[in-house]
Amino acid sequence: MSLDIDKIRADFPILQQKIYNRPLVYFDNAATTQRPQQVIDALIRTYTEYYGNIHRAAHFLADKATMAYEETRAKVRNLINAESSDQIIFTKGTTESVNLVAFSFGESFIHEGDEIIVSEMEHHSNIVPWQLLAGRKGAKIIMLPIDNNGRLLIEQLDTLITERTRLIAVTHVSNVLGTRNPIQEIARIAHSKGVRILVDGAQAAAHLLIDVQDLDVDFYAFSAHKMYGPNGVGVLYGKKELLEQMPPYQGGGEMISEVKFSGTTYNELPYKFEAGTPNISGVIAFGAAIDYLQNIGIENAASWETELLNYATAKLTQMGVRIYGNQPGKSGVISFNVDGVHFFDLGTMLDKFGIAVRTGHHCADPLMDHFNIQGTVRVSLAFYNTKEEIDVFIEALKKVISMF
Ligand code: PMP
């Protein structure tokens, strides 16, 4: 099915505006996507029609809010084909999901001298929580390297995994290289050696069909704000046997069964991991974002994004810029540098043409070290982008380069 991009764009009010008197070209979708009116309406509807604090509800508004909140949980379960809804934990984002596992899985399963394998292409949010855990427990972080094309050297896992390895932390899709990692294969290798796997799905969930059972991952984390949903909402999926053995991450309301000063018992899954009042309206509106994405069809979105990716890559390659990451099947992310021009200057000048790109290290310092660079310019695409926008971007880039 081909997408009606004009119709889709009309759903996104923010895309209609001009920046410095030029039509906005939004190419920073890997940092955060924009929201369709349907999601904005869901937020407004929640606040204007049925906002109340969820669970233990004795009144109409709270009851309705609880139902809508739990409906999103069911939608997430369906989206990633989890075995059951109680394996879907709402957090405030991928970062919190990873920290939850690092703390809580770490408490139960990581001991002094244990090893955690982390890939070289990880976002800081899938590195630092493991370093903190390693510091607390006296564990070790082992790096799984990449090659210069941005491919993860998974054949090294055979030697990197030892009898002390407990977990592999790896991204599904790199936010810098666009590389899509062979998660099913990594999970198979890990499990054959009794090792668990956590997948950072932040850059995957809006662009790939995810089936956590088929991938056979132990943990999968992602953020709603990169999926056309509200910010401040994330998901952690976990295998039930693990989640049940893991202690709570935070203490507070909702996560308890009974509290006495002599001791507390904890609530069942998923509530054990959802202490305090969550982002109620955000979770409810996330449900509308999932509906929107599924209406378009993630595979339809991905195939349009790939067409845009190929179109932009060909033009940039013709210009002779250096692109980092060229793996087959890569996602709609292009990181590049232009000889003799600082990435920050490029980004700042492109902004004056109404073009939003990201510049810098993209929270992936080890990856920057691999390529011996300080940063890149990054173009990241979404289904609402167009070839005309890429043309505008390429013309602007040529002008900017000619100024230096
Ligand atoms: N992992 C990857 C690959 C990302 O791109 C990002 C966001 N840039 C994150 C994790 C962190 O996501 P969040 O800030 O939503 O927690």
Image (cartoon, grey):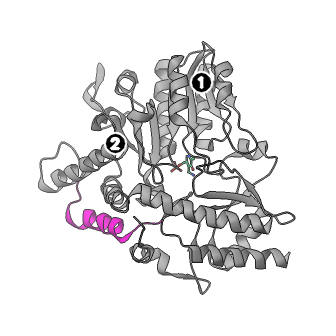
Task: Tell me: residue 296, above or below residue 374.
Answer: below
Question: Quick one: label 1, few (<14), some, or many (20+) residues within 10 Å?
Answer: some
- Determine the image quadrant of residue 13: bottom left
**Residue 112: x and y, percent?**
60, 15
> Exactly how many numbered labels are in the figure?
2
Most extreme residue toward the bottom, as rendered? 21
Callout 2: helix, strand or loop? loop
Closer-to-camera residue (78/54) = 78
Mark 2 CB near ligand 1 (8 Å cut): no
Lower position in the chain sequence, tag 1 or tag 2: 1
Q: In this view, does 101 lie to the left or right of 63?
A: right
**Residue 303: x and y, percent?**
49, 59
Residue visible at 77% across and 42% down? Answer: 370
Closer-to-camera residue (278/382) = 382
Membership of 39 in magenta stretch: yes
Q: In this view, does 299 lie to the left or right of 112?
A: left
Residue visible at 77% across and 79% down? Answer: 399
Task: Tell me: residue 229, above or below residue 147.
Answer: below
Give me the disc on residue 276.
2
Q: Give the range drawn in magenta.
A: 34-52
> Which amino acid type corresponds to the residue marked 2 in the rendered image?
Gly
Identify residue for label 1. Answer: 136
Give me the disc on residue 39.
none
Q: In which quarter of the image is the C terminus?
A: bottom right
Provide the major secondary structure of the magenta segment.
helix
Task: Tell me: residue 41, above or below residue 370.
Answer: below
Callout 1: helix, strand or loop? helix
